[in-house]
Image (cartoon, grey):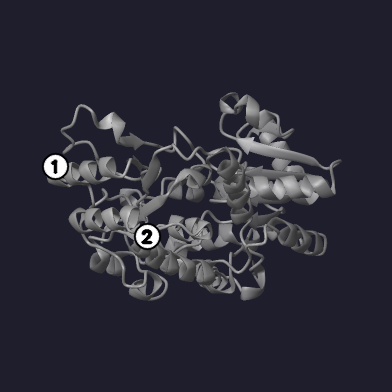
Amino acid sequence: MKPRRGPKSVTKLLLLPLYAASSVVSRLLPRTDRIWVFGRPGGIGDSPLAVLKYARSQDPQRSYVWLVDDPSRISEQEEVEGIRIVAKRSFLGYWYTQRARVAFITNGLGDLNRLGVPGAFVVYLTHGSTLKRTFLDAPARPLLPLALNNRVGELLYRRVQLITRRHYRLIVASSELTATFLATAYRVPLSRVAATGSPRTDYLLSLAEARQTARSSSEPRQVMYAPTWRDGADDPAIPSSSDWSALRSVLKAHGAFLCIRSHAWGGGDYTKNLHDDDHDSWLRFSSAKDEPDATRLLPDVDVLITDYSSIAADFSPLLRPIIFLTPDLAAYRTSRGLYGDYDEITGGTAVKSWQELTERLDLVLGDEAVRQRNIQVVRDIRTKYHAHLDGRSAERLYERVMQEARTSPTTHS
């Protein structure tokens, strides 16, 4: 079984003594509701930004602090949001995390200053409505140092994960269905999972509405390929030379282009079989370095190609075609696992090769009846994974946080 590449797994082990020391400090230094902190690996955007904007509309006098790796990389447009931006590993990053009563994250405690976390009311917004098994539900093993790369090390790792997840006072779900997945994955009672709807959906729909008014009908249609992270392995669906040739023909015939958005930790060289000096006219690449916030890209996507990635559920509110490409479905079911029956989720529409996909894409782009049948599958996915599409998920979450954060006991390691 391929080990899951957890780049911060060892860090969590090494920081345990410092967590304990920070717990002592948090008992001596009271937290305040006048400071809320936010963090996500990609910087400002996504669910935390939707929550922050609503919170500020309700209480503009509260200090809203966004913790980032490097404040110098924040654009002027983001600074206009009026958010205080602080380097999370600086003393100020520790100070604000230590003082804030409420903290919002999307990936883990490393979104903030880890040492300041103990005692905060941490709201885990998640980074997608997962189709694949995640965290402790996933059988894939973590990548640990050689001395710990054994059963004892794995048990210790899982124990540390459970300890750090005690700080998650509230986990946000997009629906009752995903709430049950998150409760088992993070080993928390269902009462600590808030099925308020994802603020990410609020954010996406607002972006899509603004983009719809600005988009020209003459713009080429965009097809995005966004595969999931395969626990350190390369993407098994890298196109061959003949695949590239067929894709090029279909895309050009329909006035479209393909954008490959690989996972931030994904592997594989998509250009190794590409022999076309003029591919810039129909093929583009978008990395997490180019645009850390994948949600910002989705309003411009006309057709999504993906596999087991949560981007399928995240994209579904737009009711645009999704084609599922799964050459490794049987192996993935064993190594990672999925929530629910994949054929039922995808309506049995998944294809196993780029040849099949190209044929399907040709029809989706050129045949309105086929496109509408595809969209019906997407509508079913939307129904399963999104209980709220009214743009008020951030509002519901804010009310839940305001109710619970003031009465919840302080949590320490």
Question: How far apart are the two marked residues, 2 and 1, measured between alpha carbons?
Answer: 29 Å
Residue at 67% x, 38% y is: 66
Would you place residue 53 above or below residue 175 in this image? above
**Disc 1 residue type (three-letter):** Ser
**Marks 2 and 1 in Cβ contact (< 8 Å):** no
Percent across and percent down for residue 404 are: 78, 64
Q: Label 2 crowding class (10 Å Cα cut-off): few <14, some 14-19, many 20+?
A: few
Q: Is residue 363 left or right of residue 378?
A: left
Q: Is residue 228 visible?
A: no
> Which numbered dot is residue 241?
1
Q: Is residue 353 visible?
A: yes
Would you place residue 18 above or below residue 185 in this image? above
Based on the displayed image, in which of its 4 quarters is residue 410 positioned? bottom right
Residue identified by numbered label 2: 368
Percent across and percent down for residue 246 are: 18, 46
Q: Is residue 355 left or right of residue 391?
A: left
**Disc 2 residue type (three-letter):** Glu
Percent across and percent down for residue 163 are: 57, 60
Q: Label 1 crowding class (10 Å Cα cut-off): few <14, some 14-19, many 20+?
A: some
Give the structural element (helix, strand or loop) at label 1.
helix
For the N terminus, the image quarter is bottom left
Residue at 39% x, 43% y is: 222
Would you place residue 262 above or below residue 372 in this image? above
For the C terminus, the image quarter is bottom right
